[in-house]
Amino acid sequence: MVAWLRGHPWQADTLLAAALFLLSLGQVPTGQADVRLEVIVVTAALAATVIPRRRFPVAAFAAGAAIGAAQIAFGLQYGRVAPVLALEPRATDLAIAVLLYTLAAHASRKVSIAGLVSCLIGASVAVLRWSPSHGPHSWALVFDALAGLGGAALTAWVLGDSVAYRYRRAYYISLEERAARLEAERDAQARIAAAAERASELQERRARAVDESAARLRRIERDLHDGAQVRLTALALTLGEVKENLEAAASGPDDADRVAALVGAAHRNAKEILTELRDLARGIHPPVLDRGLRAALAALAEASPIPVLVSGVAPPRLSPAIEAIAYFCAAELLANAAKHSAAGQVTIGLADRQGSLLMTVTDDGAGGASLVPGGGLAGLLERAQTVDGRLDIDSPPGGPTVIAIDLPGHA
Amino acid sequence: MSGVLRIVIAEDAAIMRDGLTQTLTRRGHDVVAAVGDGDALREAVDAHRPDVAIIDVRMPPTHTDEGLRAAQAIRRDHPGVGVLVFSQYIETQSAAELLAGSAEGVGYLLKDRVADVGDFIDAINRVAAGGTVLDPEVVRHLLRASRRTDALGVLTPREREVLSLVAQGRSNTAIAVEFTISPRVVEKHVASIFAKLGLEQSGNDNRRVLAAIKYLES
């Protein structure tokens, strides 16, 4: 039954209105039929105001309050004016308490307090006008009546207001939860976006690294093809000639000279092949790196036509790949400085930045170095980026040029 | 074997160019031009009409297959000029392109072959005379990669060796010398091979090279 009433507010409120109406039926005066009809109409109207109370709490209260005000104005004994019988206050006036409760529960605090105040004023005025103004106990009675009516209004308001408080609280909590959920969603989206960005960045770098290693392999193959392979073929040709000459039956003094010349050429050629192969191998992996980055840089410094000072200390545990990148960058930058800058002094600075390597190559030359797509510095930048490293250039016209390379400790 | 040959050399490595020139000159041949790229080669061939052009496959500007392209152009424009293409690597595809159409006066050799000076000079002479020279390596590739394993399986070991030499462009006489057997025995072997593979016999050495290679390739 209660559950049904909860599920059907209109029907429940209609039943409530009927009950309120029935309460006043005993108070309908006997006698003139037209007065009876008017009383029933006013009572029914007052009771009916509770029906739409939940949907229109303010309007319902206003309607109920208006009828109450009319009762105070015209339905009570007041001096010389005869009261209108139909507007006498009756039990149905409980409807106003119900409406005040509804107002407190559903309308804003400001409106509900206004409703409470108007009810208290109405109750006071009604009691003052209604009560006998003479006699020894009259003020006590007035006070009791006031306390009764005011207390009823206040109770209705407090009950409604506490319901509203629960509603509001629940609403705030749901709002807070929603805000938190939205916040979490935004965080998740931001993380996903960042991850996607990182993924595409890594993909790009990987592609570049693959391209670069393919290009390096091609370079090595080309070096082998144009260098050692050609020389070895020529050497084989010369030795083939030597062999034929030695096999020739008539090895006169002329032939001996020829053979000596051919062997001399073959010997020279073989030595050049060795040099070339050594250079090529060094280009693939400089053996000097086996003694550590510092030693390798010192070797570079010795070989440089410009005086080079190596200072600072590299992080203790760099991976071989990082050392190789740092070495090749330094070699390229020293070569650049020698070729383009007209510098008189180059400094290679090493620093340990919490395990990652910061290498700065500074020259006091002409400056004006910049990143050109496909250029040497761009190549170094790409090399650094393959391991998530950085390369920064500071080279104002007139110098000095500072290239800072930041590499992680491990690839 | 033959007289003085007029030769054009196209090779981008100077050391090889000079070595080849010296070797050929010492043997009395006339190196009329030694150039370093495909365009210069074609100009030299146009100007000198040599007996043979010795061409390196990889030359500037792209260092890929300029030599091969130039060789094909020379074969088209100057059918009388023998073309001996040299390469650091052997690719059967390049050989097939070079031999497309005719095998007359064409050679394709691994660069290393210059070390055996006698064989190398012999190859030049053969190409100059309108013969075919195919590197043993190419033939080995072809034999290994051929899908005709069933048909090749019916050949005797000696027949397979003879087929290999036939594909290299050797004449019956040369094959006979190689195996120290009589040319008549070689003839018999060749006839047997061609019968077993279902190929038409041809008296022309160049045509039988093409037939053998086409067979192995298909």
Image (spheres, coloured by chain):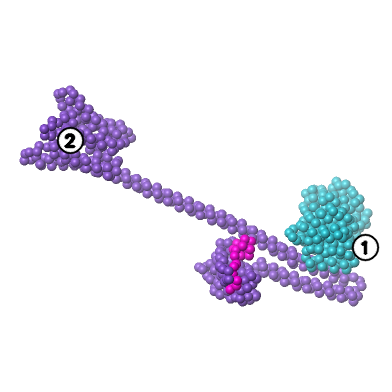
Are there few (<14), some (14-19), or many (20+) residues within 10 Å of tag 2? many
Viewer-proximal residue among B91 and A121 = A121
- The residue beneath circle 2 is A72
| Amino acid tagged 1 | Gly
The x, y position of residue A40, in whole percent, is 21, 27
SS category of the residue bearing label 1: loop
| Residue A381 located within the stretch drawn in magenta | yes
Q: Over which residues does the magenta segment extend? A: A363-383
Mark closer to the observer (1, 2): 2
Which quadrant is home to the C terminus of chain A? bottom right
State which quadrant residue A330 falls in: bottom right
Circles 1, 2 touching at the beta carbon (< 8 Å): no
| Amino acid tagged 2 | Ile
- The residue beneath circle 1 is B3
The x, y position of residue A380, in whole percent, is 61, 64
The colour assigned to chain B within the rendered structure? cyan
The x, y position of residue A97, in whole percent, is 22, 38
Say if residue B115 shows up in the picture.
no
Are there few (<14), some (14-19), or many (20+) residues within 10 Å of tag 1? few
Write down the chain letter for disc 2.
A
